Amino acid sequence: MGACSSKAQQQTRDPEPREQQPALEPKTSEPCGPSDAAAPVEAVRKMSGSSATAPKGEMPTASTGTPEQQQQQQEQQQQQQQQLERQQQQQQEQQQHQEQQQQQQEQQEQQQQDRKTSQPQQNDDAAAPPKPGGERKAQKAIMQQDDTQAEDARLLNHLEKREKTDSDLSLIRSSLSGNLVCSSLNDSEVEALANAVQFFTFAKGDIVTKQGENGSYFFIVHSGEFEVIVNEKVVNKIVQGQAFGEISLIHNSARTATIKTLSDQAALWGVQRQVFRETLKQLSSRNFAENRQFLASVEFFQMLTEAQKNVITNALVVQSFKPGQPIVKEGEKGDILYIIKSGKARVSIKGKDVRLLQKGDYFGERALLYDEPRSATITAEEETICVSIGRDLLDRVLGNLQHVLFRNIMLEALQQSKVFASFPTEQLSRLIGSVVVKDYPENYLILDRENRTKASASPLFSAQGVRFFFVLEGEVSVYAYREAPSASSSGGGSSSGEPRMELHLVDTLKRGQAFGDEYVLSPNKPFAHCVRSNGPAKLALLTASALTATLGGQDIDETLDYNNKLAITKKMYIFRYLSEQQTQTLIRAFKTVRYTQGEAIIREGEIGSRFFIIKLGEVAILKGGRRVRTLGRHDYFGERALLHDERRSATVAANSPEVDLWVVDKDVFLQIVKGPMLTHLEERIRMQDTKVEFKDLQVVRVVGRGTFGTVKLVQHIPTKIRYALKCVSRKSVVALNQQDHIRLEREIMAENDHPFIIRLVRTFRDKDFLYFLTELVTGGELYDAIRKLGLLGRYQAQFYLASIVLAIEYLHERNIAYRDLKPENILLDSQGYVKLIDFGCAKKMQGRAYTLVGTPHYMAPEVILGKGYTLTADTWAFGVCLYEFMCGPLPFGNDAEDQLEIFRDILAGKLMFPHYVTDQDAINLMKRLLCRLPEVRIGCSINGYKDIKEHAFFSDFDWDRLAGRDLSPPLLPKGETYAEDAEEGGLEIEEDEGIELEDEYDWDKDF
C-alpha cells in the first residue's frame, strides 16, 4: 500500500542517508532546455542564502537593518559559527567510527546482493555508476498533520495586538522576500502576507518552539535575542531581522530545535501555515480570475478554447510602470501584447496625443501575429499595472497563434458537419493539416462552375478539385444556378433552345462557417456552386486529392463505415486497448450479414463463437422464450464469445423486417489478438465477471502494510480467483481526518479502467474496516525492479516512462491529478508491464489545487510554492523518474539532509547530469520535463502529451506496440514478489488500542 492514505506515514525528519554518488558534471543549468538561459521562475533566483549556523529545520534567514547592525550580526554569527563547529566536531568524531562500521557492513551486504541481481557493468571508471535512487529507501508521501495544539496554545498566551508601523512592514517585507517560499511572490502578494502576520511578545526564558513538537508557525525576530537548542545544547542565536520555522510555511512538521528567549524582553512576528497558504490561495485565485476576464476582452482570443485561454492566463506576466514611463515606443519592433489591469496610459502618434487607455484596454495584439513595428507610443499616465505575454512564450505554450486560431475554426466547423462529425480527432487533425489556405480581395469570384479558364490553369480550381471550404476571415456569398423564369416577351429560353440559367443566393458564410458536405459525400459530383468574397477574405480549401490522401484511399462511405465500427468497438474493454494495427485488422475483418424478421441470430444455451454489431434494424433479447429487451442501431452483443467457450445466456432474434449486422468470428479474432494481450484480456474479463461476496474470500497471506491497515492476498473460494484486499482501519482514517480522501480514492478507483492502472473490483465495509478488493499484481514494485536492473538503457527507460505516460494521460483526460508519482507507486504484473497503484493522493481537478501533497523529491515547484497548480505537477514527476532511471540519483535534493533542503533544491538548484549519461535526446527530454515554468514544460502546452510522444527520445519507440502488449519488458518477474512477507492470518485485524473517537458510521456509506 503506498499513498497519502494507505502507505506508512511520511517521516518528517531527515531521510535515510544515500550512498555517495560519483561527481556530477554540469552539462546544463537550464531547467527548461537550451532556449532558456536561466531558470524560468526568475524570482526563485532572488532567493537569499540562509545562515548555516542553525539546525536545518530552524535555519534563520538573512538579517536586515542598518549596515552597523548587519556588521554586528555578522560578527556574532561568526563567533557562533566557531562555537558550533567545535561542538559539532566533537559529536562527529564520536559518530565517525560507528558510521564507518555501518557503511562497511552495508557495502558488504550490497556487494552480495549485486552479485545476485546485477548484470556486469561495462565501465572503465574507478567508481561504477550508481543504481537508480542510490541507496535510498522507498519514500513515503507527505500526510499533512494539523495537530499543532500544544504549540498553538502556548503561543496564544504571547499574542498581542500591534498596529504595524512603516518600519515594521519594511522589516517583515524584507524577511519575507528572502524566504524560500516567498521569493517568487510579487509585491502585492508580499504586502498581503505582511499584513497577515501577528505580533508575539516574550520574556526571558520563555519557550517559543519545542524540539519534537509539531509546529505550523514561521517567525521573524522583531526585537531581542533567542537561542537555538538542539538535544539540550545551545547551538545558535537568532537576532533582529532573522527568521526561523521556514519549513512550516510548506507543511506542518516536527520542530528540529527548541527556540528559547534570551533577552529580558523580545518580540516576534509570526504567521501560521494555514493563514499563509490560504492568503496565497485567495490572492492567486483572484488574480487568475481577473486575468482570465481581461483575456476574454481581447477579441482575437475569443476563438480559442477554454483550455487554451487557461494556458495563456497561467503564462501572463505582471508588469508595473511608473507615471511617465514608456510602455512601448513608436517604430520599435514589437512582440508583446499588453492588457491594462489598473491605471491609465496615453497613446501618442508622432508626438500627438490620440487617446487614453484604461483598465481592460489592450494594445500590441498585432505584435503577436505579425513582425510589424509599433504604430504608436504608449506611456503610463499614472502608476499602471499590465499583464502581458510575448510572442516567444505564447509560441511555446500554445504554438503559432494564427495557426491555432485557424485550426480551432476548422475543427469546430468539422465537428458540426453532418459528414465529419463522426470522425475521430486524429482524422480531423489530418484533414486540417491537408487544407490549402488562400487570401482573396473584395468581390473576387473564388469558385465558379463556368470558370473553365481558371479550372484549366490550376487543378485546385477544377470542377472536381475543391470539395469543402472554411471561412477563416471575412465573409463570402454562395450562389447556385437555377432556371430563369420564362420571358414570353422575348420568346423564352436561349438561342440554342436550352433553358436560361441564373444565379441565386444560397447562403452567406462568415468566419467559422464551412460549406461542401454534399460534395464530400458525392466525390464525383462537379462543384456546381459559385463563391464570391464580400470583402477581403481568407479561405481554407479541402481538395479531392487531399481528402483521398487523408482517408488512405478509401471513399467517404468506407471511412464513415470504419469510423462507426471503431467508435462502437472502443466502448468495450476487450477492443479499447488493442494496438492501432490490431484494431484496423479487426475492423476490416467484420462481415455484413442480413437477417429477416423473427430469424434467430444466436440461441440460448449454444456455445458462442461470434460477436455482433447492429448496423441497421432492431433485435430482441429473449430468455426462456420471454422478451427481456430490444437493441437497436450500433448496439452490440456476443463479445464474450471471442474470449471464452461458454454457452449463450439468451436468444437474440431479428425484430424488424431486415436486420444488418457486422459480424466477426472467434477464430479471426484469435488470429489478430494473441500472446500477452490475449492473456491479459482473458484475466481481466474473468476477474470482472465474478460476483464476489465478502464471506467467500479466504486469506492466503499478508502482502503489504501501511498507515491504515494491511493488504492481503485473498482467494475467492468458488472460482479460485485471487485478489488483493486492502483493509483500512476506520478509526485510523477518522483519527487522521482522512474521510474525504478515502471516499475520493474509492470514487476515482471505481472509474478507472486502463490496463496500466490497478483495477478496483468492489468495496466492502464493516464496523471496524473498509475493504478495497482489487486485482492482484504479483511482479513487485518498479522501485525494486530498477535497482535490480541498474542504470536503465534507452529502451528500458522508454518502456517504463512510456507506460507511466499512458497511465497518467488516461487520468488527465478525466481531469484527475495523481499527485504522488514515483517508482514505489508502480507495480509490475506477471508479464512485466506496469500497474499504477495507490490513489490516496489523487484529486479530481476543478480549476487549480493548492494542497501540499506528494513525496518531497518528486514534488513540482508549483506544488511547493502554494500559489496553485494543475495537472502539470504530474508531468514534472515524469522528469524525476526518467532522471532516476538513467542517471541513478534523484535530480534535486538527492543528498539533502532534510525536507527544507529538498524543497530549496527543487526551487532553485541547478539541473546537472553525470558524465556517464551521454544520450542527448534523453538529456533534452529531462531538461524539458524538469522545467520550473509549468506552462513551458513539455507535455503541459496545448499539444499535451503529443509533444512527449513525438520527442526525439521516443523516435525509435513503438507506442502502438506498447499499448498492444507486443513489446518485451525490461524485466520479466520470476515467481511472485510482494511488498513484504507475512504470516497467514484471518480477515480480522487487531484494532488500534488507544484510539477512541466519535465516528459517524455514514461517512463511508458508499463502500
Image (tube, rainbow, N blue to C red):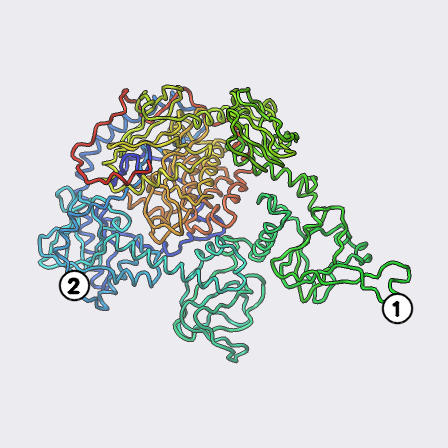
Which mark's residue is nearer the viewer, 2 or 1?
Answer: 1
Query: Which residue is nearer to you in this view: 138 or 86?
Result: 138
Amino acid type of the residue that numbered disc 2 sits on in the rendered structure: Lys
| Quadrant including the N terminus | top left
Which residue is tagged 1? 490
Identity of the residue drawn at 58% across and 63% down: 371
Determine the CA span between mark 2 and mark 1: 102 Å
- Name which of mark 2 and mark 1 comes first in the sequence: 2
Residue 850 placement (x, y as % from top left): 34, 50
953 with respect to 859 (left or right): right
Mark 2 and mark 1 residues within 8 Å of each other at the beta carbon: no
Residue 164 placement (x, y as % from top left): 21, 66
Label 1 sits on a secondary structure element that is helix
Which residue is tagged 2? 161
Instruction: Answer above or below: position of 108 versus 139.
Output: above
Quarter of the image where one finds residue 509: bottom right
Instruction: Answer above or below: position of 262 versus 624.
Output: below
Residue 623 shows in this picture: yes
